[in-house]
Amino acid sequence: MSTHNEERTVLSVLTYNRPSVLLRMTSLFYRRGYNIETLVVCETDREDLSRFTVTLSGDSGIIEQIRRQLLKLEDIVKVDVLQLDECAASELLLIKVRAAENRHDLLILSQACGCRVVDIGQDSLTFELSGRGADVRAFIDKVRPYGILEMGCTGLTALQRGDSTIFDSLI
Amino acid sequence: MKLNGSEILLECLLEQGVDTVFGYPGGTVLNIYDALYKYSDRIQHILTAHEQGASHAADGYARTTGKVGVCIATSGPGATNLVTGIATAYMDSIPMVAITGNVATPLLGRDSFQEIDITGVTIPITKHNFLVKDVNQLADTVRLAFEIAQSGRPGPVLVDIPKDVSAALAEYTPAPAVKARPIAPPKADRLERTVEILAEAKRPLLYIGGGVIASGAAEQVRALAEKLDIPVCSSLMGLGGFPADHPLWLGMVGMHGTRAANCATRDCDTLIVCGARFSDRVAGNPKGFAAGAKIIHMDVDHAEFDKNVLSTVRLAGDLKETLAIVTDRLDPACHTEWLAACAENRVEWPAFPTDPEAPVDPSVILRTLRDLTDRDTVLVTDVGQHQMWSAQFYKQYAPRHLLTSGGLGTMGYGMGAAIGAQFAAPDKKIALVTGDGCFHMNLNELTTMVSYKLPVVILLMDNRVLGMVRQWQKVFYQKRFAATDPERQTDFPKLAEAFGCKGLVIEKNGDIEPVLREALATADGPVLVDCRISKDANVLPMIPPGGSVDQMIESMEEYENER
Amino acid sequence: MKDNRTVTVLSVLAYNNPAVLLRMTGLFYRRGFNIETMVACQTDRPSLSRLTVTMTGQSAEIKQVRRQLLKLEDIVKVDVLEMADCAASSLALIKVSATPENRHAVLSAAQTYGCRVLDIGDTTITLEMTGREEEVNRFVEFMRPFNIVEMGCTGVTALQRGDTTIFDGLEG
């Protein structure tokens, strides 16, 4: 949701699992004025490693500069630069929409868009939708006329399509 | 063998060949100082007047020797007082390990007495830092800190050790000194491309920076320049990377660089950049810098490529190795016409004034100092007009003989750095050129020089104003001299004497040589020379920020008349 | 990503500026607060961002975190919620080995859990699972025998159940 440009680049960053990594990365982005769109962190199946997925739009020069700066951080093991369309990528949206007499229309709409109802309030419905930025944005625009009460989005996580993984060519 | 954390720390310093550390004791480093007492026969601890002095001393030590400088401070204010020194080292890529104490681990995060999150504070100004919470990790962490500090592009690393960790016992197993991490050789196809470009170049120019000093590549620069007959210019940080008496030398490039060097960057068709980073003080206008030239950028730090100026070929690798390969593959060449064109832009220095009663010209002091000192003399500077005069008029012949805060521009750097330099090179003459503004910032370290009987010659360019800022006000702010003319009444020779240091005065042209001779002959402690210069002395030439050589101001009178 | 503990959700509303994430991360790091997940997103109001933090500490620690967060100039509001009181979801992408022999088994497991197939490689299948964290974790455990070759999770985003929103009680 947090993007307005589908020409997005994904940085898949493998790091050592240390408490300061997130701080070091956010400090770098902030200090050098790199505008990132989303950043998500998760553990990996290897206890010593974490995975960061960063999305951003920018020309290839900036992205290469960011990649090089990231690689200078001691905690960072590897940075894969991927185009969004090379990735299996999703983000998740929770959205609470005003729903009174029009509740039925909303439910039909949500069903058509493949999203789940995760909570039913007196005057609201909360939906969960997953997909790429564009799908998520399209849904937000569709329910906007009903009245969006609030929403929360996770940011994008992405894996390279096909059989390759972030662990490839790691020693 | 079981040792406590502090002893493990000192054993690890010994492993790395450290025999001198600069620091200041305090509550959370008491354990470490207790161990220093025990290890005093093997590790010399130099007590400065302020932690900032210790950090600059570690930096000066590192710049003089090329080894990792070490400083120690207690938690809280001790640690924050190191910050400026760490940032100075970071900006100039100086290998340093800063060790700080912190409150015991159960007290962390609770705003305990003298607690500060120094790892959080120093993330943007260190290559890396560590908070060691387990004594069993301490030895390997210290070793890794040394490895990181000296690998690739060097820089400062901070190790924060809580008090309970420096007290706790752990098994210590000795290990050999760490080595800098190997650097991948430059890529073959890029080397090939470099060789092609250089073989075709009609007007090539070498632009060197601090990377040449860090990599120890001065000889390789010279070999390439001589074999291909290429003129050489340098950033402030690269001075000493090429001998200033060499016929191919054009001088410093950038804001206060020579006309010859700046014109050459404008006119060259190929620019070979060695360990330099196109800072805004060199390439005021990055879009117009060496416009039209093919740029071959050699650096160990990949992130420098295309950061400020786009290059044609990027050669990542150790400079020494890269330059050696490139030189080896090229046939000797001659660029007589190009060199002659460069030579036309050289500006000769005026002859020394002969009138002994004439007012003191700072350039004459520095040129006289150069004549009176041997080539081994290490010149330390502070920051401002005197720094630029030093860079312009005190010629550098070899690496590691000019210590100056180039990137951060830290006023107050000089006193600490001179202390570090004298401990690094006890047999060399150390001269510090400072200004009255800078000296007022960290003059407390005079007491350190006196305590340790360091024969540093301090040349204080005393114009009673904050000269460089005032010069900018003169040029860009219509002479509105805000806060640059403080009317301080400090009697510097008397101040020196109060510290137990000899104080001398240069008031007129005729004083310069005899007073400098007397100062240089002083061997039992520091000597301060109060050089009373005019407050209207300017640093020229000057390219306004964002400008290029075509906007160079060479005479303040002409500039003012034009306005 | 572990089960069976009381998880607290901090829903943080902050001014949308580039330093917020850095300031929050710095605070957590400096104070030694252990957070489980943190996600950031924009809101429908251009000046505000929403950050959702989950953690498992004692209530005293959580109060401390909340108070420290509220001291940051950029932070407008911090709601402390029990996970159980929230519509809360996270998303996992799981790439599992899938040979021609077991491909069918992988796909039917995916179907059972209602997850989407995002990509089919020569020897792997990438699945997307969404839901409450414990459901996602259960699915991950279920798929483990198939050999998970890599995985990416988003962290939890959460909205309070019912009609209340993070904007309640805000002026303007």
Image (spheres, coloured by chain):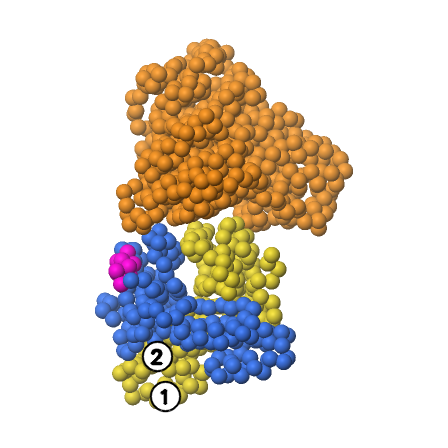
Chain colours: A yellow, B orange, C blue
- In this rendering, would B266 be left or right of B452? right
- In this rendering, would C124 be left or right of B443? right
Q: Is residue B321 visible?
A: yes
- The chain containing the residue under callout 2 comes to A
Q: What's the residue at 62%, 35% (across, down)?
A: B217
Badge 2 local density, few (<14 within 10 Å), some, or many (20+)? Answer: many
Numbered circle sitting on residue A126: 2
The correct choice, above or below, for B7 with respect to A54 in the image is above
Amino acid type, callout 2: Thr
Q: What's the residue at 69%, 38% (across, down)?
A: B324
Q: Nearer the viewer, residue B547 or C28?
A: C28
Residue A46 % position (x, y)? 51, 62
- The chain containing the residue under callout 1 comes to A
Q: Nearer the viewer, mark 2 or mark 1?
A: 2
- In this rendering, would B211 be left or right of C84? right
Is C62 within the magenta? Answer: yes
Q: Nearer the viewer, residue A47 or C167?
A: A47
Label 2 and label 1: CA atoms lie apart by 14 Å
* Residue furthest out toward the front: B1
Residue A133 % position (x, y)? 47, 72
Q: What's the residue at 55%, 75% (across, down)?
A: C146
The correct choice, above or below, for B365 with respect to A31 in the image is above
Numbered circle sitting on residue A105: 1
Mark 2 and mark 1 on one chain:
yes
Amino acid type, callout 1: Asp
Specify start and end residues of the magenta stretch as a single range.
C59-68
Q: Which of the 4 image quadrants contains residue B88?
A: top left
The quadrant of the image that shows the C terminus of chain B is top left
